[in-house]
Image: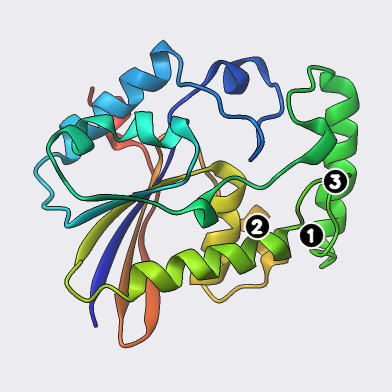
Amino acid sequence: MDKELYIIRHGETDYNRLGIVQGRGVNTDLNDLGREQGKAFYQYYKHVPFDKVYTSALKRTHQTVKNFLEEGIPWELLPGLDELSFGIWEGNESKEDWLSAFHEMKNYWQSGQCDLSFEKGESPNQVSERLQEALDVILSRPTEKRVLICMHGRSLLVLLCMLSQSPISCMANFNHSNTCLYRVSYFNGRFSILEANDVRHLTNS
C-alpha cells in the first residue's frame, strides 16, 4: 500500500509568540499571523489532491487547515495527534523557571530517559504510543493515497523519530516551525522523509 503524508505543524498562536507553555491541555486559537500562515500554506498546496485531512483534537490544528476543510475534503479528528502534555507548566508564564525545567528534562530525554515527564504531564514514550494508534488508523485506509496531517511541535518530533526508525531520544535531530511541512512517503512498509521543515510557502506568500 502506497501513501504520501503531508505533515504540518499548526500556525502561530499568541502563546507561541509570547513563549508561554502550550501543550495538550491548552486549547488556544491561532493569532493573526497563524491564520495568515495557514492561508499561505493553502495557497501553495491547494492544487494537491488530498484524499483526507487528519488533525489533532485541538482547535489550532483545525484552524490551520480551515481552507482545505471548506473545500469539502473529508476530515477526521485523531486525539492521538495531540501535543505532548507539559503538565503543571502549561499556561505558565514564568519563562526563566520553565526554560530551566525544560532544559533539564530535555537532557534526560536526550540521554534516553524518555519515560520521564513533567509533573502531571506525559512522557515522550507515552506520546509515541498514542501516535502509533493514530498512525495505524491512517495507514488502515487504503483508498486514502495522499493525506494532510496537522499536529503539534513536540509530538511531531516524536513522530519523526518513529517514521525514521530512530530512538525517541533523537528528537533534537529534527527541526520544526509554525506550518512547516514534512512530506513523507510510505512504500512497502517503510517511511521515507522526502522534504523536511519546508516553509517555502511562507517565503513565497
Q: Which amino acid does label 2 sit on?
A: Met
Give the label on residue 139, or none: none
Location of mark 3 (residue): 118
Residue identified by numbered label 1: 110
For the residue labelled by badge 1, is the local secondary structure a helix, a strand or a loop?
helix
Q: Is residue 84 left or right of residue 186?
A: right
Between discs 1 and 3, the one toward the N terminus: 1
| Above or below, comparing residue 92 to residue 102 in the picture | above
Dot 3 amino acid type? Phe
Q: Which residue is drawn at 71% across and 28% down?
A: 21
Q: Which of 14 and 202 is in front in this view?
A: 14
Residue to which mark 2 is pinned: 171
Question: Which-is-in-front pick, marks 2 and 3?
Answer: 3
Q: How crowded is mark 1: few (under 14 residues within 10 Å), some or many (20 or more)?
A: some
- Spatial CA distance of label 2 from label 3 is 17 Å
> Left or right of 176: which side holds 182?
left
Expressed as whole percent of the image width and height from the top left, the position of residue 36 reads 32, 18
Q: Residue at x 48, y 21 (%)?
A: 29
Give percent across and percent down for residue 78: 45, 54
Q: What is the secondary structure assignment of the residue under circle 2? A: helix
Give the amino acid type for the residue marked by disc 1 in the picture.
Gln
Residue 22 lies left or right of residue 53; in this view the side is: right
Among the two numbered marks 2 and 3 on one chain, the one whose residue lies closer to the N terminus: 3
Q: Is residue 204 visible?
A: yes
